[in-house]
């Protein structure tokens, strides 16, 4: 094998074996746990699925005052953790394309829908400078191109929060309270849109739901409640300007608008940390 082939031949992102694509090899694929169905509000799989039941008991008892849903592609197990940390901390940018493929099945119904925008969860500016990039923003740009929608970096992180790791649900809620502000110059790009709040890992949802609350306080979502603290969560980061590759209005009726209404937020994560992992 020539030297150039060693550097550019596709490999499995987990074990590094040479193959035809940069996707998982057959053996490593089994270590990735794809989520199939689950609660529409927290993306937690049902322990005992019941036909016709789409919301778990915990979420059914909540009233956050606005319509939202939550989706995640895979379980946050040791394999997912390794891959996400490689992108987040070790500049393994080749994983951005892989993660966009992982998200493709759970975002298929948003493809080409003109009233959809993606808002990545932002990093605090000092952390962004230290790291040099926001992995969620990188992923948002790739996903937006695939879906034919717009990325709007409408949120800024104004509070340098501590790490959410090892915190209880209540501590996570308190940690991110007031952490975000809406960038007013981008607010007009969100009005009457279905917003996908993109994160890397969803633990309890506090960070992403705090983002939704911030959008509400900025006047984007009319009628949002202020009791976000009832649910809690974990988030990632992003900062910047509107990306290129904005989709044009196809003129067709929005499936999402029909089902969920034009002022809707869907929290999207690569991976979901299941409750029994906490």
Image (cartoon, grey):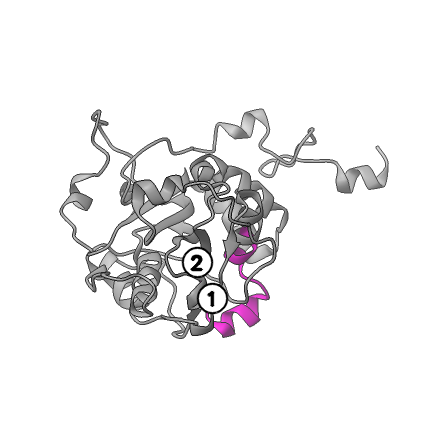
In-front residue for pair 56/257:
257
Helix, strand or loop at mark 2: loop
Name the residue carrying label 1.
Answer: 123
- Check whether the beta carbons of the residues at disc 1 and disc 2 lie within 8 A of each other: yes
Q: Position of residue 103 (x, y in %)?
A: 48, 40
Q: Residue furthest right?
A: 2
Q: Residues within 10 Å of mark 1 (few under 14, many from 20)?
A: many
Q: CA distance from mark 1 to mark 2?
A: 7 Å
- In terms of image quadrants, where is residue 7? top right
Number of disc labels: 2
Q: Is residue 122 above or below residue 19?
A: below
- Label 2 crowd (10 A; few <14 / some 14-19 / many >=20): many
Residue 77 part of the magenta-drawn span: no
Q: Which residues are magenta?
A: 119-139
> Which of disc 2 and disc 1 is earlier in sequence?
1
Q: Position of residue 116 (x, y in %)?
A: 44, 50
Q: Secondary structure at mark 1?
A: loop
Residue shown at 67% from the left, 35% from the top: 11
Would you say residue 117 is visible in this rendering? yes
Q: Which residue is mark 2?
A: 236
């Amino acid at each position: 094998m020539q030297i150039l082939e060693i550097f550019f031949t596709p490999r499995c992102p987990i074990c590094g074996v040479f193959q035809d694509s940069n996707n998982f090899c057959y053996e490593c694929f089994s270590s990735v746990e794809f989520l199939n169905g689950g609660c529409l509000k927290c993306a937690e799989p049902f322990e005992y699925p019941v036909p016709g039941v789409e919301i778990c008991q915990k979420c059914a008892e909540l009233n956050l005052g606005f319509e939202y849903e939550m989706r995640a592609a895979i379980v946050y197990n040791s394999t997912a953790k390794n891959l996400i940390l490689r992108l987040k901390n070790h500049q393994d940018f080749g994983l951005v394309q892989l993660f966009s493929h992982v998200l493709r099945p759970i975002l298929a119904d948003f493809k080409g829908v003109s009233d959809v925008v993606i808002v990545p969860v932002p990093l605090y500016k000092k952390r962004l400078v230290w790291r040099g990039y926001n992995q969620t923003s990188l992923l948002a740009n790739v996903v937006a191109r695939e879906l034919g929608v717009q990325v709007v970096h409408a949120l800024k992180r104004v509070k340098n929060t501590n790490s959410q790791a090892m915190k209880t649900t209540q501590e996570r809620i308190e940690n991110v309270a007031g952490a975000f502000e809406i960038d007013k110059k981008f607010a007009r790009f969100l009005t009457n849109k279905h917003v996908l709040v993109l994160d890397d890992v969803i633990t309890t949802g506090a960070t992403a739901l705090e983002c939704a609350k911030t959008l509400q306080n900025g006047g984007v979502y009319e009628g949002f409640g202020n009791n976000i603290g009832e649910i809690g969560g974990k988030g990632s980061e992003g900062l910047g300007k509107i990306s290129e590759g904005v989709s044009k209005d196809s003129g067709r009726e929005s499936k999402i608008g029909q089902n969920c209404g034009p002022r809707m937020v869907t929290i999207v994560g690569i991976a979901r940390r299941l409750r029994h992992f906490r």
